[in-house]
Amino acid sequence: MTGPVRPLRVGLDARLVSGDRGGVEQVVIGLASGLTRLDDGDEEYLFLENPRHTACLEPYVFGRG
């Protein structure tokens, strides 16, 4: 017996300071940009950010219209 299908939830730990971690920053930015551009599913994305450095992901995270 199966229940209702729930949306896929994806969490990304993006608690970093811009320019501090080299390649890790590019990977996090790429994931944030790519995942938030998907439009074929009902996924939910949660990005954990450093409260003092939230601006580093803002240009790369897109909402669904």
Image (cartoon, helix red, strand yellow):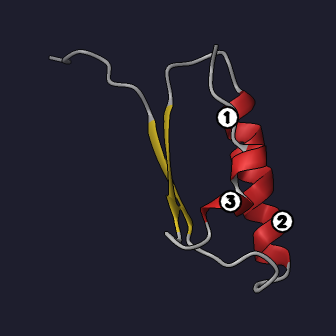
- Which residue does the image show at 14% across and 17% down from the upper left? 1
Check disc 2 and give the amino acid type: Gln
Quarter of the figure with residue 12 = bottom right
- Which residue does the image show at 67% across and 18% down from the upper left? 39
Q: Residue 4, how many percent across, how many down?
A: 24, 15
Camera-nearest label, 3 or 1: 3
Report whether 42 appears left or right of 59. Answer: left
SS label for mark 3: helix
Q: Residue 18, how many percent across, how many down?
A: 76, 75
- Which residue does the image show at 32% across and 24% down from the upper left? 6
SS label for mark 2: helix
| Picture layout, residue 26 above or below residue 63 | below
Residue 36 image label: 1
Q: Which residue is mark 3?
A: 55
Extreme bottom residue here?
A: 20
| Picture layout, residue 37 above or below residue 20 | above
Check disc 3 and give the amino acid type: Ala
Q: Residue 21, how many percent across, how many down?
A: 76, 84
SS label for mark 1: helix
N-term mark: 3 or 2: 2
Q: Which residue is mark 2?
A: 26
Contact flag, marks 3 and 2 (Cβ < 8 Å): no
- Which residue does the image show at 73% across and 62% down from the upper left? 56
Check disc 1 and give the amino acid type: Thr
